[in-house]
Image: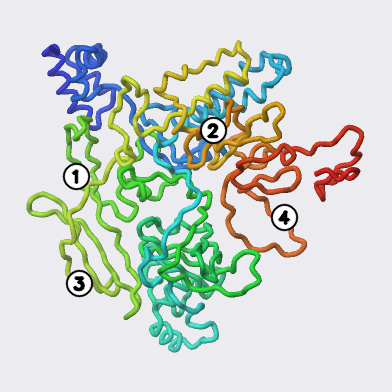
């Protein structure tokens, strides 16, 4: 029943949209005049054309892609000098390249300032017997950050990563001695001979340097006379090492630097030994550091090189939390931008750019104009102009000079398709003839890697793309509760879940936060509910009553006795006598000085220091006791 002229125009515009045309180009190409864009959209979204809407490109929509935490923070610092939503946003964000305000730090700051100006006309101490303008501002900041930096659907707020040493394969680590050659050996000829006798020791002691960074200085013979200053030793001191699980570990060089790794194997004497990673080679999945440390608090000095039967836990550094992952392979993080692999962040309008896998390299090829629909009837992404092949490099070998090289290149075959060729050898300068290794895969657009729809248009119950996690209702409702009524901030009703939801949603809190319910009359028990254990929304509570409210800030750390963090404390070295205490970032400290982990049920006495009137003249902070009557 579709008008024939509109139908023909829709097909023609489908080809235009799939190329690099802008919206202005689209309008100028309309044969029906300036109003054809609106006409096509109106026809395509009419109730009578639901089938057509599923099979043709909707000519207005959003283009979401995933942006890592490190990228949007770097962009915010470059444009404004600071990241406004710090602590509230600690995840991989879903950004809309079609909307300028999306993932825009400057816009978020401006909106907050305008809200502050509007709020300034009220008497902040008089509009409510409970809330103040500061409460209102805190709630609005949480909400505006949730709208500007929407959370990507994948659970990318994990702060720990676990795995089997070398995936359960042998070896689990390399038994070496550093520095090698030994510092006492000064004769160049002898140093060279020693290096050739144990090439693996030379490479690992020097942090497994890559040829792309150090050139020929990364070779065993060069390192014998010119070692690198790594792992705290100018002669190469990375004696401790462990091979991570290939199934879960990152393939990016340097990814785990400054993260802490701990052996978690049950029933072994060295359970709990730990180290701070100082060098990481992604191709070999090899983490390197100075040495293993004994379990914190242990009187033993025993440590052991990990075995293939061991398991480990990595406490990720804050710089790598919130990395985007591949939607169809969520165990893998996204690779670098093909056009700008070394850029700290990409312009918003690039939509995440073309990307290969984390373990692959990009190869530029002529762009092919493509149109069509995928298996779900959604429009396919345009061709990116890049193909992907495995990343070149070497894996450690126990023979020869300790390098087993594979160098990959792109080759166009007679049938017009592309293949990855492979050359092997024991050095990058002595390689065999190329052989076809496998078919090359096309690089994918940022939104495609993130599982987002090309040119998504809202319909029915979906106001945002499927790859965007909806915001929790409570984030919006807190603004209504804590702000003056005359501000006229409104939220949708609970039944309208196009942009908000109740569970499986973004609560805008750090991982593992918990908040208390107010105690019921006559009860000494206060129950807690986990709000964000894995980066999603609140879990259902097993107690009667409703959630009292969110903490004032974006994190539960050190905000008082009613809020705690259900986190895992990483191991750390025992402090020397006289050193100032280290700030604890994983635990909440109560007024009585106690530590709570995974708060379940606690009494009111644990939360507050109750002092009977006239009975206590002094509160001893050192002991956490009331000096007069000994109350805790």
Quarter of the view holding residue 560 = top right
What residue sits right under mark 1 in the picture?
366
Is residue 288 found left or right of 349 in the rendered image? right
Q: Nearer the viewer, mark 1 or mark 4?
A: 4
Q: Earlier in the sequence, mark 1 or mark 2?
A: 1
What residue sits right under mark 2 in the picture?
541
| Contact? badges 1 and 4 (CB < 8 Å) | no
Which corner quadrant holds the C terminus? Answer: top right
**Badge number at residue 135:** none
Q: Earlier in the sequence, mark 2 or mark 4?
A: 2
- Indicate the position of residue 63 as horizontal and vertical percent values: 33, 30
Q: Residue furthest front?
A: 522
Residue at 37% over, 23% down: 463
- Indicate the position of residue 249 as horizontal and vertical percent values: 40, 57
Q: Nearer the viewer, mark 3 or mark 2?
A: 2
Q: CA distance from mark 3 to mark 1?
A: 28 Å
Q: CA distance from mark 3 to mark 2?
A: 64 Å
What SS does tag 1 mark?
loop
Q: Earlier in the sequence, mark 1 or mark 4?
A: 1
Q: CA distance from mark 1 to mark 2?
A: 56 Å
The residue carrying pointer 3 sits among few (fewer than 14), some (14 to 19) or many (20 or more) residues within 10 Å by Cα, namely few
Colour mapping: rainbow
What residue sits right under mark 4 in the picture?
581
What SS does tag 3 mark?
loop
Residue at 41% over, 87% down: 193
């Amino acid at each position: 029943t579709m008008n024939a002229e509109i139908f023909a125009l829709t097909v023609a515009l489908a080809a235009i949209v799939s190329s690099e045309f802008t919206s202005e180009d689209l309008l100028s190409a309309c044969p029906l005049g300036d109003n054809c864009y609106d006409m096509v959209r109106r026809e395509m979204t009419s109730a009578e054309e639901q089938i057509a809407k599923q099979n043709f490109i909707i000519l207005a929509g959003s283009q979401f892609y995933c942006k890592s935490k490190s990228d949007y923070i770097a962009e915010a610092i470059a444009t404004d000098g600071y990241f406004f939503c710090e602590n509230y946003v600690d995840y991989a964000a879903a950004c809309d390249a079609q909307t300028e305000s999306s993932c825009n730090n400057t816009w978020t700051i401006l909106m907050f300032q305008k809200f502050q100006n509007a709020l300034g006309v009220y008497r902040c101490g008089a509009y409510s017997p409970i809330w103040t303008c500061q409460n209102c501002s805190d709630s609005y900041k949480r909400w505006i950050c949730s709208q500007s930096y929407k959370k990507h659907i994948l659970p990318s707020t994990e702060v720990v990563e676990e795995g089997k040493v070398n995936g359960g394969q042998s070896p689990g680590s390399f038994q070496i001695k550093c520095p090698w050659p030994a510092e006492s050996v000064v004769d160049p000829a002898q140093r060279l001979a020693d290096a050739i006798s144990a090439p693996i020791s030379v490479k690992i002691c020097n942090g497994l340097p890559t040829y792309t960074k150090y050139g020929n200085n990364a070779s065993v013979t060069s390192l014998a006379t010119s070692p690198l200053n790594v792992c705290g030793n100018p002669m190469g001191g990375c004696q401790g090492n462990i091979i991570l699980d290939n199934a879960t570990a990152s393939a990016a060089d340097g990814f785990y630097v400054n993260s802490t790794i701990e052996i978690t194997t049950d029933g072994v004497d060295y359970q709990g030994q730990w180290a701070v990673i100082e060098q990481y080679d992604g191709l070999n999945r090899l983490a390197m550091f100075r040495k293993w440390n004994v379990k914190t608090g242990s009187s033993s000095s025993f440590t052991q090189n990990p075995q293939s039967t061991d398991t480990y836990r990595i406490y990720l550094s804050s710089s790598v939390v919130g990395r985007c992952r591949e939607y169809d392979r969520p165990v893998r993080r996204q690779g670098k931008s093909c056009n700008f692999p070394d850029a700290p962040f990409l312009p918003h309008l690039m939509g995440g750019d073309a990307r290969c896998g984390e373990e692959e390299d990009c190869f530029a090829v002529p762009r092919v104009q493509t149109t069509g629909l995928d298996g779900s009837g959604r429009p396919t992404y345009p061709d990116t102009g890049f193909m992907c092949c495995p990343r070149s490099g070497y894996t450690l070998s126990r023979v020869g000079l300790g390098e087993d090289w594979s160098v990959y290149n792109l080759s166009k075959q007679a049938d017009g398709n592309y293949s990855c060729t492979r050359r092997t050898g024991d050095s990058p300068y002595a390689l065999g003839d190329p052989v076809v290794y496998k078919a090359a895969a096309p690089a994918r657009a940022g939104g495609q890697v993130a599982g987002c729809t090309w040119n998504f248009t809202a319909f029915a119950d979906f106001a945002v793309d499927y790859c965007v996690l909806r915001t929790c209702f409570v984030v919006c409702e807190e603004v209504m509760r804590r702000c003056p009524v005359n501000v006229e901030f409104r939220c949708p009703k609970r039944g309208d879940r196009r942009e908000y939801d109740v569970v499986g949603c973004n609560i805008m809190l750090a991982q593992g936060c918990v908040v208390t319910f107010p105690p019921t009359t006559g009860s000494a028990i206060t129950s807690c509910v986990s709000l964000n254990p894995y980066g999603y929304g609140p879990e259902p509570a097993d107690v009667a009553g409703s959630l009292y409210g969110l903490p004032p800030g974006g994190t539960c750390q050190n905000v008082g006795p009613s809020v705690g963090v259900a986190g895992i404390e990483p191991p750390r070295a025992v402090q020397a006598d006289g050193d100032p205490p280290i700030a604890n970032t994983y635990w909440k400290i109560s007024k009585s000085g106690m530590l709570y982990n995974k708060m379940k049920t606690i009494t009111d006495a644990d939360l507050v220091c109750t002092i009977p009137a006239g009975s206590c003249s002094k509160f001893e902070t050192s002991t956490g006791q009331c000096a007069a009557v000994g109350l805790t």
